């Protein structure tokens, strides 16, 4: 049997295990010595049968064989014991006493020596005792105490008898026997030390082997864990790369971004259906969906309790399962109604408030379980979708606010131009009145020439049309409407506000001139908003030259510059200090005593919404030039702008 090494290698623990191993080895070798004794003793008795009384021989032989049988009985009992280590010291003590009794019986050979008639018989007895002693040394030295308890009673009585004899030969035999005993005990001691050392090394090696095996298992477990972590990390990196590619691809609208995210989720999670749903009370409305076979469509409304999302909105973490039929989900109303086996979903919040859920599902079970990366990814996707919806809401609100602000700015500009508009409208009305009174006077005075009357009525119609045109322009400029990005010619934009431009110039005794490059390509713009920007810049230029004593000239120019159309408004006023030039476009910054500082800021927002930019530069001579750019129209960006305008509405 092999000793079992303990987990630790403390000295007292090693000593106990070595002792247990020595006792087991003692019992393992015991049958050999016992069988030898059973055979040698009868042979000795047979040799001495004629020389020594038979009664003495039989008595000695009986006692000896009994002790040998006791040793064999102990060996058999020990081998049949199920838990030998529980009382190992007890078994060692038992066998030591049995061996001591056996040694005493062998030591009883002193009586055989005394009764032997010849020196030959005595020499034969001494030779047998020496052999028995050496047999004990070979089989009992695993437990040194047992060997000593067996050897001393076996050898001392015969040796003392020989040493006490007057015969020199017998005394020499006794002295030789003493040396033989010492040699045997020394050999037993050395063999016992070697055995102990070997057992100690074996236990230590076994401990080291177990430690190595444990360390190897731990290293393999660590390697497996590290490999799993590396695989999970690689999976996370791949998931993040796919997620980044989905959110970084330029898309104009939130709906397109969310649709791309649903497609990514379906591909990533291996599920066919992806849904973004809005939840209000017990109402479940599908906002966006990917469903290859049309199982569910955008705008579908379900009862929240009939969906797995009913549990998702109350979960603290993403909800997932791969095979609903194999779990308690088989009793869920969603499974009973739609038979959806696999599901992965997470709640969506917008602005810190519950909005709905983002989920992916499929009818067949998912072969592989959802990983930690899958659950973390859908949570990240849900947060991103919530942020996109919130950002889209804020952008729409800002755009509506900007539209209202631009409308207010137009009304304010019309208010400032009100007296000029009244004067402009009053002129054709006065002309109409005079022409009408003339016609009436001619009719009262007698016959009228039809041609002359027709000419007067034409003049009345012309003045009426002019009045109608001015009023229509005012109404159009004052109205609040949705942005409409159209392909328009810049000259047409200027022609539509030509009355306003010249009206503003005449009121302030300013000379207005245009320098529009011929053959300018059409631009993509909302006409009303761009007219507002031009009127705003002209109005500011007129105000800037209010106290100027020099020539008052405003030049509106336009030219093609590197794929965009650049429009500029140049004045000959006093100009702007360099340190204030960069602040002119900031909201609420103004150099006018009664200004609000919103006109240029609103104009800048309008231009940037068109994909252009607005800036100011000092002139070489007097004054400042404000410039802004507009994109050249094409079918692609015209379509995009139209869709954007409809989406914003």
Image: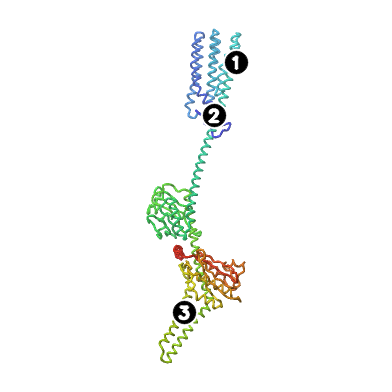
- Residue 423 location (% of width, % of height): 52, 80
The answer for how far apart the CA atoms under marks 1 and 3 are is: 152 Å
State the residue at coordinates (48%, 82%).
Answer: 428
Is 577 drawn above or below residue 62 in the view shown? below
Q: Is residue 62 above or below residue 89?
A: above
Q: Which residue is mark 2?
A: 202
Q: Mark 1 and mark 2: span between their CA atoms?
A: 34 Å
SS at mark 2? helix
| Quadrant of residue 539 within the rendered picture | bottom right
Q: What number is the disc on residue 179?
A: 1
Callout 3 crowding tier (Cα within 10 Å): few <14, some 14–19, many ≥20: some
Q: Identify the disc placed on residue 466.
A: 3
Residue 217 horizontal/vertical position (percent): 51, 38
- Residue 4 lies, with reference to residue 432, above or below; the image says above
Nearest-to-viewer mark from 2 and 3? 3
Is disc 1 placed on a helix, strand or loop?
A: helix
Q: Residue furthest front?
A: 518
């Amino acid at each position: 049997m092999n000793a079992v090494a303990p987990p630790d290698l403390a000295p007292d623990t090693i000593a106990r295990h070595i002792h247990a191993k020595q006792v087991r080895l003692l019992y393992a070798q015991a049958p050999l010595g016992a069988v030898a004794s059973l055979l040698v003793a009868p042979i000795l008795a047979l040799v001495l049968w004629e020389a020594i009384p038979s009664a003495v021989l039989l008595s000695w032989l009986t006692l000896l064989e009994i002790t040998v049988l006791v040793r064999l009985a102990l060996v058999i009992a020990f081998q049949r014991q199920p838990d030998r280590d529980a009382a190992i010291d007890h078994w060692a003590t038992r066998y030591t006493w049995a061996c001591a009794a056996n040694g005493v019986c062998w030591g009883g050979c002193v009586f055989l020596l005394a009764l032997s008639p010849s020196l030959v018989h005595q020499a034969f007895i001494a030779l047998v005792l020496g052999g028995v002693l050496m047999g004990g040394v070979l089989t009992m030295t695993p437990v040194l105490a047992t060997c000593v308890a067996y050897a001393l009673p076996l050898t001392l009585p015969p040796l003392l008898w020989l040493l006490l004899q007057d015969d020199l030969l017998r005394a020499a035999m006794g002295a030789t026997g003493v040396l033989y005993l010492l040699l045997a005990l020394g050999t037993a001691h050395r063999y016992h030390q070697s055995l102990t050392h070997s057992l100690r090394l074996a236990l230590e090696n076994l401990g080291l082997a177990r430690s190595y095996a444990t360390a190897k298992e731990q290293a393999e477990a660590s390697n497996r864990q590290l490999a799993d972590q590396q695989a999970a990390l690689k999976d996370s990196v791949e998931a993040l790369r796919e997620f980044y590619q989905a959110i970084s691809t330029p898309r104009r609208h939130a709906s397109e971004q969310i649709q791309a995210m649903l497609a990514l989720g379906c591909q990533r999670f291996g599920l066919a259906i992806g849904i973004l749903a809005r939840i209000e009370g017990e109402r479940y409305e599908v906002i966006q969906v990917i469903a290859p076979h049309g199982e569910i469509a955008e705008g579908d409304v379900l009862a929240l309790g009939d969906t797995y999302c009913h549990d998702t909105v109350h979960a603290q973490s993403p909800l997932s399962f791969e095979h609903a039929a194999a779990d308690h989900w088989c009793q869920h109303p969603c499974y009973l109604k739609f038979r959806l086996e696999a599901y992965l979903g997470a709640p969506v919040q917008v602005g810190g408030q519950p909005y709905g859920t983002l989920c992916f599902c499929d009818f067949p079970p998912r072969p592989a379980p959802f990983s930690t990366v899958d659950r973390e990814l859908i949570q990240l996707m849900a947060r991103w979708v919530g942020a996109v919806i919130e950002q889209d809401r804020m952008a729409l609100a800002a755009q509506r606010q900007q539209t209202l602000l631009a409308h207010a700015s137009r009304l304010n500009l019309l208010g400032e131009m009100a007296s000029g508009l009244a004067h402009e409208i009053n002129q054709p009305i006065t002309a109409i009145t005079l022409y009408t009174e003339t016609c009436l006077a001619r009719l009262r005075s007698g016959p009228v020439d039809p041609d002359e009357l027709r000419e007067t009525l034409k003049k009345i119609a012309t003045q009426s049309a002019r009045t109608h045109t001015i009023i229509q322009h005012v109404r159009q400029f004052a109205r609040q409407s949705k942005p409409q990005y159209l392909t328009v010619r810049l000259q047409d934009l200027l022609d539509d506000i030509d009355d306003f431009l010249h009206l503003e110039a005449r009121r302030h005794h300013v000379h207005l001139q245009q320098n529009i490059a011929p053959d300018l390509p059409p631009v993509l713009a909302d006409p009303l908003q761009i007219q507002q920007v031009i009127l705003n810049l002209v109005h500011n230029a007129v105000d800037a030259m209010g106290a100027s004593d020099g020539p008052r000239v405003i030049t509106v120019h336009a030219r093609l510059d590197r794929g965009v159309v650049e429009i500029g408004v140049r004045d000959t006023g006093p100009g702007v200090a360099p340190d204030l030039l960069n602040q002119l476009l900031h909201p609420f910054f103004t150099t006018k005593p009664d200004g609000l500082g919103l006109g240029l800021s609103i104009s800048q927002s309008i231009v940037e919404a068109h994909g252009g930019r607005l800036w100011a530069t000092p002139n070489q001579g007097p004054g400042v030039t404000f410039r802004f750019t507009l994109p050249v129209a094409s079918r692609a960006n015209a379509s995009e702008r139209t869709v954007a305008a409809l989406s914003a509405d």
